[in-house]
Image: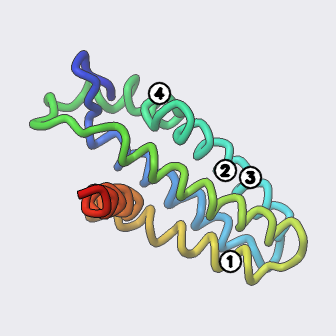
Amino acid sequence: MTSSSGGIDPRGPRFTAAITLVVFAAALLLSDAAPGVAAVITGVQAVLFAIGAGLGVQRTPTGALFRTFIRPRLSPPTELEDPAPPRFAQAVGLVFAVVATIGFATGVVLLGQVAAALAFVAAFLNAVFAFCLGCEMYLLGLRLSRRAAA
């Protein structure tokens, strides 16, 4: 997913979003009957988000899966992407995954469901439409900070 110039293949974060979508769907489906299992699932996802936020999405286990099994079967990307916006998106996802985990683990299932549903929607937008909500938040923050500095 990383090139020699530091950009990443934008299909990698989309692949990761597709996996994340499945993870949050499973947590939501299990949340009423087995909130403890939903807490474990969202907790594992929180760890993956923490890796992505700290080291970059290309260094997550799903990034390794993409790099090893998917990327070699694809043509080279037409453009590379700055890794900073997806990394920020991972941090945003981490917040939602932690809140979901806390909600499910403490019996405040509705809190867990709301947080997991919001993360599910963000993952869906990225996986299906290549619209990274966290990336857009990052770019908006950059524009606002530049405007404030001017």
Which residue of the protein is positioned furthest toward the top in this rendering?
A: 4
Q: Name the residue at 39% across, 46% down.
A: 86
**CA distance separating discs 1 and 2:** 15 Å
Q: Which residue is mark 1?
A: 113
Q: Position of residue 69 (x, y in %)?
A: 38, 27
Quarter holding the N terminus is top left
Mark on residue 64?
4
Q: Which residue is mark 3?
A: 43
Q: Secondary structure at mark 3?
A: helix
Q: Name the residue at 81% across, 61% down.
A: 37
Going by the numbered disc 1, the residue's amino acid type is: Gln
- Contact between labelled residues 3 and 4, with CB atoms less than 8 Å apart: no
**CA distance separating discs 3 and 1:** 14 Å
Lower position in the chain sequence, tag 1 or tag 2? 2
**CA distance separating discs 1 and 4:** 29 Å
Q: Is residue 45 left or right of residue 144?
A: right
Viewer-proximal residue among 142 and 65: 142
- Contact between labelled residues 2 and 3, with CB atoms less than 8 Å apart: yes
Q: Is residue 150 left or right of residue 58?
A: left
Which residue of the protein is positioned furthest toward the front in this rendering?
A: 150
Lower position in the chain sequence, tag 3 or tag 1? 3
Which residue of the protein is positioned furthest toward the left in this rendering?
A: 78
Mark on residue 46?
2
Few, some or many C-alpha atoms within 10 Å of disc 1 (few <14, some 14-19, many ≥20)? many
Reply above or below: 103 against 70. below
Quarter holding the C terminus is bottom left
> Which image quadrant for residue 63?
top left
